[in-house]
Amino acid sequence: MAKKRGDDLVVQHVEKMSRKLLETHHGLVREYIGGRVGLYALYNKKQLHYVGLASNLRSRLTTHFRDRHGDAWDTFSLYLTGTAEHLRELEALLIRVAKPKGNRSKTKLPGSHDLQRHFKRFIKERNERELTELFGVSGAAARRLRQVPVKGKAPTLAGYITKKTRIQWERRDQTYRAWLFPDGKIQFKGKLFNSPSLAASHITKRAMSGWHVWRFESSPGKWERLDSLRKESKARKGKASISPSKGRAPTLEGYFSKRTPIRWLRKDTTYKAAVLKDGRVQFQGRMFTSPSSAASHVTKRAMNGWDCWRFEAPDGEWVKLDRLRKGSDRKPH
């Protein structure tokens, strides 16, 4: 569609003219620029010196013969506009970009929002997400995450995994990715959720069963629904399975006269278990005949559980199980 002539911002212009034109050809100047509105630029030896606007360009330019710019310019350019609308913003834009030496005042762009603050926040959040994906959530980063409150409810996935695990949901040609932590919380787009259903509902804005939509990689290339973890846990509890040191007597037998809590603080995660009266260690729905096998269940490698797990001594101090073997706490308690 052709643009109407009246829609043009600049309707006439003249560039890099000698100031002598203004001094010697008054009639010509009066006819073409007398009383006209527009922007002008003053130059000194081809270098931009000053930018200004005027509702009467002829009068303003002749003023510059006598003011502080009098001897600082030898040529000028004029840009005549059909209206004075937006001239001040244009002047400010030119001054901010070109930074002429003769313009002293700091110009503003009224109505314009500085995007630098938004860029900084975006880059900061992206860097935090990248660090989280690569190295997990640090204590400081975790405190910055916005947690979705679930009053009175603990994370529903607590105890199902022993290390940070990637989960994903493929929905309508789009893949959503999140992190599942050993404490059962799910991190998705800078927020923490106490259940997979809440994380899913955050996307759909309606109630969802997140157990059936989110999947984890159970083996290379094989993604299973989170619901399989729940089913496996129920099956384990039903069998009350004893792991792997089958046929061996519990190594903690005789040390405790009642069910006693033990715990292990590892990499900002506290693992909680219990030693039963018969010496077995109950941890994450399984039974272990030694603290070392319970610790190895977490790390997937051989561990000395006597140095990892701690119990609360009578004085309130949490001490290593190894103290029991050394005899300082040999008596059952």
Image (spheres, rainbow, N blue to C red):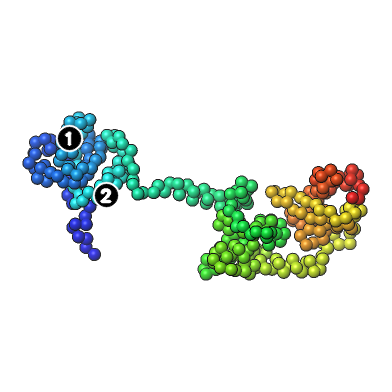
Expressed as whole percent of the image width and height from the top left, the position of residue 207 reads 58, 68
Residue 87's mark? none
Location of the N terminus (image quadrant): bottom left
Q: Does residue 224 appear in this view?
A: no
Decide: is 302 above or below 172.
above
Residue at 84% x, 48% y is 321
Left or right, residue 122 beside residue 268: left
Which mark is first along the chain, 1 or 2? 1
Element marked by disc 1 = helix
Expressed as whole percent of the image width and height from the top left, the position of residue 185 reads 65, 57
Answer few, some or many: residues within 10 Å of disc 2's Cα (few below 14, many 20 plus, some between 14 and 19). few
Q: Does residue 228 appear in this view?
A: yes
Expressed as whole percent of the image width and height from the top left, the position of residue 135 reads 62, 50
How far is the residue under mark 2 from the one under mark 1? 23 Å
The amino acid type of the residue labelled 2 equals His
Q: Which residue is mark 1?
A: 63
Residue at 11% x, 46% y is 32
Residue at 21% x, 42% y is 54
Left or right, residue 29 beside residue 317: left
Element marked by disc 2 = loop
Q: Which residue is mark 2?
A: 86
The amino acid type of the residue labelled 1 equals Thr
